[in-house]
Amino acid sequence: MSVIDRARTAYDPVNQAVRCPKSIEYEAFVRVTRALNQASVPSPTQTVKLAKAVHDNRRLWTMLAADVASGGNRLSQETRAGLFYLAEFTVAHSRKVLKREATVDALIDVNTAVMGGLRSSVRPT
């Protein structure tokens, strides 16, 4: 299973009603993904924007990894493991982006897939 496939299914299956934390997670992903997109456009301040966007994205994923590693997390073991793997991938790929060995495209793709999973797991009330 590829990284993108893991991201798409990160929250499957979810049998819980709408919860505020998922909305907060979704908005956090929207914010950092938008910043990554904007930082990928060449500009005089691109390096600074890119470093900040990658740092913020890495912080989000580090917090998510800590949450899924905690004993109180109610996601399935498989989902928790998948999200933890994605967090590790994100940290490693972020290093490559900052070294100019890779683009932010994979980070954007992973975040977008997770946002899709978050959105589809929230049931309208």
Image (tube, rainbow, N blue to C red):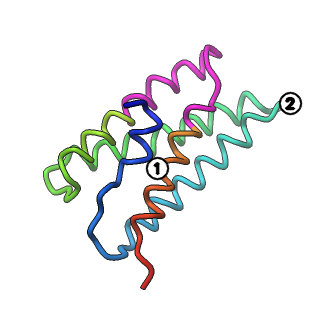
Residue tagged by mark 1? 114
Tell me where residue 45 appears, x and y as whole percent.
80, 33
Report which quarter residue 109 is drawn in: top right
> What residue would you read off at disc 2?
44
Where does the C terminus fall, quadrant-wise? bottom left
Mark closer to the chain start, 2 or 1: 2
Prevailing secondary structure of the magenta residues:
helix
* Residue found 79% across the figure and 35% down from its top: 41
Q: How much space separates mark 2 and mark 1, taking CA atoms?
A: 31 Å
Secondary structure type for disc 1 = helix
Image point (70%, 42%), residue name: 37
Query: 10 Å neighbourhood of mark 1: few (<14), some, or many (≥20)?
Result: many
Furthest residue to the right?
A: 44
Looking at numbered disc 2 in the image, what kind of residue is underneath it? Pro
SS at circle 2: loop
Q: Is residue 40 left or right of residue 116?
A: right
Q: Which residues are magenta?
A: 87-107
Q: Quadrant of residue 17?
A: bottom left
Q: Position of residue 58 (x, y in %)?
A: 48, 37
Residue 65, x across and y down, in percent: 32, 42
Which residue is the extreme one toward the left?
71
Query: Which labelled disc corresponds to residue 93?
Result: none
Q: Nearer the viewer, residue 73 or 118?
A: 118
At horizontal 60% and vertical 54% (from top left) the residue drawn is 31
The image quadrant of residue 55 is top right
**In the drawing, does residue 45 fall left or right of residue 68?**
right
- The amino acid beneath tag 1 is Val
Q: Is residue 7 magenta?
A: no
Above or below, 10 relative to 14? above
